[in-house]
Image: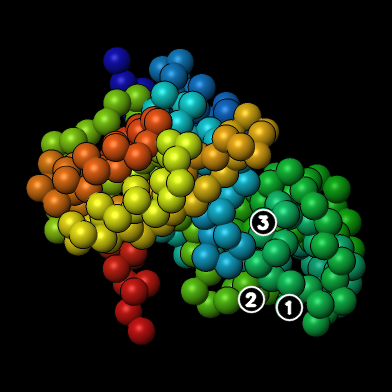
């Protein structure tokens, strides 16, 4: 049974909410308190899909998300690139010079440091972007503003005192769309495969593991490492490559990778978002 819902973390009006509306406009967005709650909503059948942010072009990767992906039991079926436009939101009638503090998620605060510094506004950490907008509306204090998406202003009845205040004009967040089961049937000009692996405890294991991708002409677009179980000796790697596991060169590269790994798990095979290619252009 399907629910036609897509779960996201945060309050209505969050950037994840925007991503849901852009990527799956026919589905009903389901707000959840935490990333774990998003995953559980899909596991429990309360939603068909999960929308999870993984990295931002200005701030970097989203903390903890790579730990959750392999343990979630879900599979990646798509990606969505969302251009992050940040607005300064305040209660109606507020002037910019009245604002002393701006509240938002710590990730967003790091994306508009220049604007805050120029206007002498202090950054306050909130639970999330839309949640900060909701709190600003509830408190009704002109000295307190929120940094959030324009959508949040519509939802919570706030005024936009300034728009597009992000430090970098190409500020973009990448989201992963996840489902209970993988879909290996789709084909497009640009397919991506995401996986996690641990190398065997032998000299130059990572170097040897990566060799198969080079010799088989497989482009690796992402490789990140992180500790497992809080110990320095257990390292897991997350990787994105271009291609489908059934492509001959990808199959050979993954087979060679298997010789040097103690574990290998494919998290998803999916079409690249068109904005990924657009970002490559000079």
Q: How far is disc 1 from disc 3 in space, using C-alphas?
A: 14 Å
87 relative position to 198: left or right: right
Q: Residue under circle 3? A: 107
Kindly indicate the quadrant of the structure image that contains residue 179.
Answer: top left
Secondary structure at badge 1 equals helix
Image x and y of residue 270, in percent: 26, 45
Q: Residue under circle 2? A: 167
The residue at 45%/40% (across/down) is 202
Q: How far is disc 2 from disc 1 in space, using C-alphas?
A: 6 Å
Q: Is residue 115 visible?
A: yes
The residue at 49%/74% (across/down) is 170
The residue at 62%/46% (across/down) is 63
Q: Nearer the viewer, residue 136 or 207?
A: 207
Q: Earlier in the sequence, mark 3 or mark 2?
A: 3
Dots 3, 2 in contact, CB < 8 A: no
The numbered mark at residue 223 is none
Image x and y of residue 246, in percent: 13, 41
Q: Residue under circle 1? A: 114
219 relative position to 240: left or right: left
Q: How far is disc 3 from disc 2 in space, using C-alphas?
A: 13 Å
Dots 2, 1 in contact, CB < 8 A: yes
Mark 2 closeness class: few <14, some 14–19, many ≥20 residues within 10 Å:
some
Q: Earlier in the sequence, mark 1 or mark 3?
A: 3
Secondary structure at badge 2 equals loop
């Amino acid at each position: 049974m399907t629910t036609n819902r897509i779960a996201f973390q945060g309050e209505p009006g969050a950037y994840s909410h925007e991503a849901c509306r852009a990527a799956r406009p026919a589905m009903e967005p389901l707000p959840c308190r935490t990333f774990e709650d998003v995953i559980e909503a899909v596991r429990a059948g309360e939603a068909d899909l999960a929308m999870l942010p993984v990295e931002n072009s200005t701030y970097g990767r989203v903390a903890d998300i790579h730990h959750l992906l392999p343990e979630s039991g879900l599979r990646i079926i798509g990606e969505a690139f969302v251009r992050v436009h940040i607005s300064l939101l305040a209660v109606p009638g507020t002037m910019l010079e009245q604002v002393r503090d701006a509240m938002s998620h710590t990730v967003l605060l790091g994306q508009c440091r220049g604007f805050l510094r120029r206007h002498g506004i202090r950054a306050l950490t909130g639970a999330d972007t839309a949640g900060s907008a909701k709190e600003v509306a509830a408190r009704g204090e002109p000295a307190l503003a929120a940094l959030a998406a324009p959508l949040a202003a519509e939802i919570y009845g706030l005024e936009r005192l300034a728009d597009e205040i992000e430090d970098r004009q190409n500020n973009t967040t990448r989201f992963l769309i996840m489902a209970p089961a993988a879909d290996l049937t789709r084909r497009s000009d640009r397919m991506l495969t995401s996986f996690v692996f641990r190398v065997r405890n032998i000299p130059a294991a990572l170097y040897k593991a990566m060799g198969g991708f080079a010799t088989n002409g497989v482009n690796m677009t992402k490789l990140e490492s992180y500790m497992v179980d809080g110990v320095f000796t257990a390292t897991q790697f997350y990787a994105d490559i271009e291609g489908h596991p059934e492509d001959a060169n990808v199959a050979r590269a993954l087979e060679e990778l298997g010789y040097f790994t103690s574990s290998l798990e494919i998290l998803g095979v999916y079409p690249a978002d068109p904005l990924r290619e657009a970002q490559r252009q000079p």
